[in-house]
Amino acid sequence: MQIIKPAIAGTTESSDVQIMVSPNNGNGIEINLNSIVKAQFGDSILETVKEVLEAFDVKDAIIQIQDKGAFDWVIRARMQAALCRGSETPFDWKQVE
């Protein structure tokens, strides 16, 4: 999947996460995480984000994450929505596990 335009999913409300994706012009994946629970769960959040990027075969994107304590499934859903919006690809519900 190729990210062709900036896109956003989620909010900055408590227990949610706002994820912004944008093209990275052939420079690979860049992830910037800002989280109120980064010390405790930063590695887990990054692992979830990387799993979604791999599942969607994204090789080139800038990912900006503003986390307010979201659960893993919320992070995963926001990532999926942002990637589909940024690539202008309809979401394939068959991919949901």
Image (tube, helix red, strand yellow):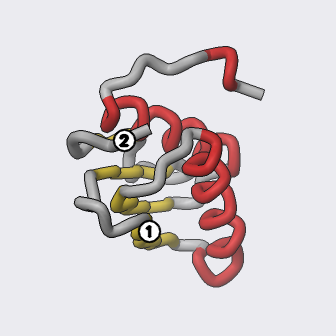
User: Is residue 72 shown above or below 33?
Assistant: above
Name which of mark 2 and mark 1 comes first in the sequence.
2
User: Is residue 18 shown above or below 78?
Assistant: below
State how far apart marks 2 and 1 are (Cα): 16 Å
Coordinates of residue 50 in the picture (x, y in percent): 61, 58
- The quadrant holding residue 40 is bottom right
**The residue positioned farthest toward the bottom in the image shown:** 39
Q: Amino acid at mark 2?
A: Gln
- Who's the residue at 55% across and 50% down the image? 53
Taking the image as shown, residue 45 lies to the left or right of residue 5, namely right
Taking the image as shown, residue 35 lies to the left or right of residue 18, namely right
- Who's the residue at 68% across and 74% down the image? 43
**The residue positioned farthest toward the right in the image shown:** 97
Q: Which mark is residue 31?
A: 1
Q: State which quarter of the image contains the N terminus.
A: top left
- Who's the residue at 41% across and 31% down the image? 84
Q: State which quarter of the image contains the C terminus.
A: top right
Callout 2–callout 1 Cβ contact below 8 Å = no
Q: Which mark is residue 2?
A: 2
Front-lying residue, 73 or 90: 90
